[in-house]
């Protein structure tokens, strides 16, 4: 009995020692793992990059630029004084462009919030709306600019005309002789005083005849005539001032519109062009499989 117990103990100890040896060997020897298993066991340190957004302009506008506001023109003091004379088309053009940009912004936000549209489809909708609305508005802008430019040319041509009233008056020759006898400084002061006092007889005598008769050259005579016309035709001069102001506002609005197209749409024009090209290619394929109704 005693011998039997000793044998069992010895076998158990040997089994335990053998198991321990195998464990140590397993730790010491690398276990073979297939490449696929190894790839699953390795942690993935790379971030999964999301697809870039088609709305790739970070500073998209939410309201039209103040430069497009027609109030910039109607607030001019001469607008009220002249009752908007000659600049009505400019006011309407600015209203059209300001309104078009506002509508595009509203369409953009509505399209982005529409769950039935993909981002690409929403962007193309906004881009097409922008093209339709702002093209119509800029045509009004161009037409108003052309109309005002012609009107300014007509008014300024009238203001440059020689003053002929009084050129052949009873004292015209004497007035010219007097001016011719003066030195340059006295002559300038003499003519400036006649302009300020709106002395038509003196101005007509000096500026309505050949300049040399009054001791003037052609350039100075033209300059004096222009100044005299501005003073004696004050309302015409104001009309020119208001129309030139309107032209400057139209040009500023057109410039801002061109430089802010991407911010109005909310995406780069190159992105829009790529999406349109992709849509066109897809349409070619789809039209080949989808029968006409």
Image: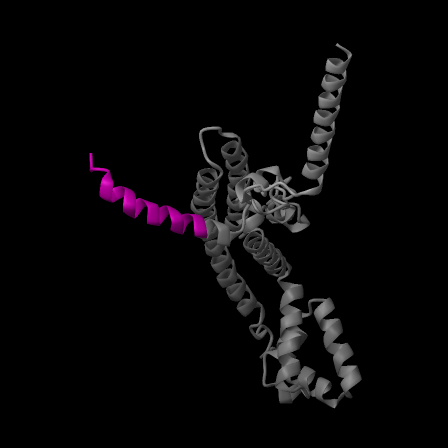
Image quadrant in which the C terminus is located: top left
Tell me residue 22's x, y (percent): 68, 34
Left or right of 179? Residue 128 is: left
Q: How is the image coloured?
A: one colour
* Residue bounds of the magenta highlight: 274-293
In which image quadrant can residue 203 be found? bottom right
As displayed, is residue 232 above or below residue 102? Answer: below
Left or right of 178? Residue 59 is: left
Observer able to see residue 290: yes
As displayed, is residue 67 above or below residue 200? Answer: above
- Residue farthest to the top? 1
As displayed, is residue 1 above or below residue 108? Answer: above
Observer able to see residue 170: no
Let me know if residue 277 is in the magenta part: yes
Instruction: Out of 132 and 9, give the one closest to the viewer.
Output: 9
Let me know if residue 288 is in the magenta part: yes
| Residue at 28 percent of width and 42 percent of height | 286
Instruction: Out of 72 and 255, give the one closest to the viewer.
Output: 255
Image quadrant in which the N terminus is located: top right
Tell me residue 274's x, y (percent): 44, 52
Tell me residue 21's x, y (percent): 72, 34
Left or right of 267? Residue 229 is: right
């Amino acid at each position: 009995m005693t011998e039997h117990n000793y044998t069992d103990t010895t076998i158990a100890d040997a089994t335990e020692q053998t198991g321990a040896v195998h464990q140590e060997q397993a730790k010491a020897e690398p276990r073979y793992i297939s490449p696929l298993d190894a790839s699953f066991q390795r942690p993935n340190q790379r971030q999964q990059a999301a697809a870039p957004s088609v709305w790739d302009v970070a500073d998209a506008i939410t309201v039209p630029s103040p430069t497009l506001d027609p109030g910039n023109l109607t607030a001019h003091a001469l607008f009220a004084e002249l009752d908007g004379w000659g600049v009505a088309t400019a006011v309407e053009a600015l209203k059209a462009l300001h309104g078009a940009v506002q509508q595009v912004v509203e369409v953009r936000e509505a399209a982005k919030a529409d769950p039935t549209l993909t981002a690409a489809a929403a962007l193309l909708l906004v881009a097409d709306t922008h093209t339709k609305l702002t093209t119509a508005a800029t045509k009004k802008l161009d037409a108003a600019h052309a109309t005002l430019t012609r009107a300014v040319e007509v008014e300024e041509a009238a203001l440059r005309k020689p003053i002929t009233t009084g050129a052949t008056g009873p004292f015209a020759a004497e007035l010219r002789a007097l001016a011719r006898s003066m030195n340059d400084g006295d002559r300038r002061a003499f003519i400036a005083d006649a302009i300020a006092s709106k002395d038509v007889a003196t101005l007509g005598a000096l500026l309505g005849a050949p300049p040399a008769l009054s001791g003037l050259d052609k350039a100075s005579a033209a300059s004096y005539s222009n100044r005299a016309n501005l003073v004696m035709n004050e309302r015409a001069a104001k009309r020119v001032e208001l129309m030139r102001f309107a032209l400057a506002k139209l040009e500023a609005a057109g410039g801002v519109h061109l430089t802010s197209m991407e911010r109005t749409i909310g995406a780069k024009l190159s992105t829009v062009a790529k999406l349109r090209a992709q849509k066109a290619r897809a349409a070619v394929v789809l039209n080949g499989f989808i029968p006409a109704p």
